[in-house]
């Protein structure tokens, strides 16, 4: 139906009848053509159905493959996770053991150093005690010697005083000489004591 037939139904019917009058093709040919078209469409539909069936089969296979792949991936992931967890646990245990060994070695080393320091301090204390004892003994011996020398000096001065008085010296001169001699002897004894003490301290501390 043309545009004019839509606008004017009566004229459209006239045109349609005129066109049918001019169509001289037989009805059988048109029917055969329609049947051929229908058969072609049926074959196309059958091919489409076959393609759809094939696609459905491939989709089922794809789904099965995807499910299998997902299962395999899940299993591999669990296996990898288990291996990683075991590896981390092993590494943690090794680190703990290493730290414990280092801690034990450090404790043993500190104990050995402390023992050596204690032994060294004990040895130094013993040496210092022995050195001070030796210095004290030497000082006492030096003081005894100085005391003996001073006593001998006083005894000599006393003897000289008596001898001087016996020879007729005046008492004042004798006292003056005695005082001078006592002063000189005392200073000589003190100097000798100081020198002896310095020598003993130098030998005791290793200065000499």
Image (spheres, rainbow, N blue to C red):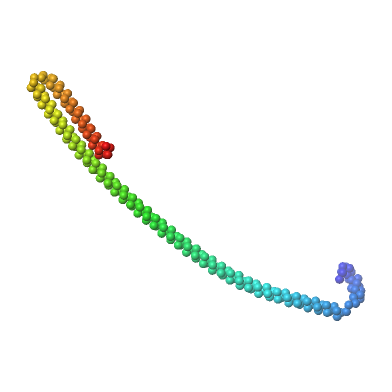
x and y percent of residue 85 in the render?
48, 63
Residue at image position (77%, 76%) is 41
Residue at image position (47%, 61%) is 88
For this orientation, the residue located farthest to the bottom is: 28
Q: How many numbered marks appear?
A: 0
Q: Check the image and report above or below for 152 versus 98.
A: above
Q: Check the image and report above or below for 140 versus 27.
A: above
60 lies left or right of 101:
right
Specify whether residue 47 is in view: yes
Residue at image position (86%, 80%) is 28
x and y percent of residue 89 in the render?
46, 62
Q: Check the image and report above or below for 119 versus 94.
A: above
x and y percent of residue 205 in the render?
27, 39
Quadrant in the rendering for residue 102: bottom left
For this orientation, the residue located farthest to the front is: 208
Q: Check the image and report above or below for 188 versus 35.
A: above
Q: 165 and 80: which one is in front?
A: 165
């Amino acid at each position: 139906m043309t545009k004019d037939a839509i606008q004017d139904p009566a004229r459209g019917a006239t045109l349609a009848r005129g066109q049918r009058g001019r169509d001289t093709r037989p009805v059988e040919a048109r029917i055969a053509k329609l049947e051929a078209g229908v058969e072609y469409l049926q074959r196309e539909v059958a091919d489409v159905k076959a393609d759809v069936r094939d696609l459905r089969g491939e989709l089922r296979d794809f789904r099965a493959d995807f499910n299998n792949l997902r299962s395999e991936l899940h299993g591999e992931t669990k296996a990898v996770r288990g291996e990683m967890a075991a590896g981390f646990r092993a590494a943690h245990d090794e680190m703990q053991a290493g730290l414990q060994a280092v801690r034990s070695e450090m404790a043993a080393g500190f104990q050995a150093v402390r023992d050596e320091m204690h032994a060294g301090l004990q040895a130094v204390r013993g040496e210092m005690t022995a050195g001070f004892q030796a210095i004290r003994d030497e000082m006492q011996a030096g003081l005894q010697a100085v005391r003996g020398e001073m006593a001998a000096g006083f005894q000599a001065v006393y003897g000289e005083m008596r001898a001087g008085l016996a020879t007729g010296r005046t008492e004042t001169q004798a006292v003056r000489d005695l005082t001078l001699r006592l002063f000189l002897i005392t200073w000589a004894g003190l100097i000798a004591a100081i020198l002896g003490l310095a020598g003993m301290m130098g030998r005791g501390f290793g200065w000499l």
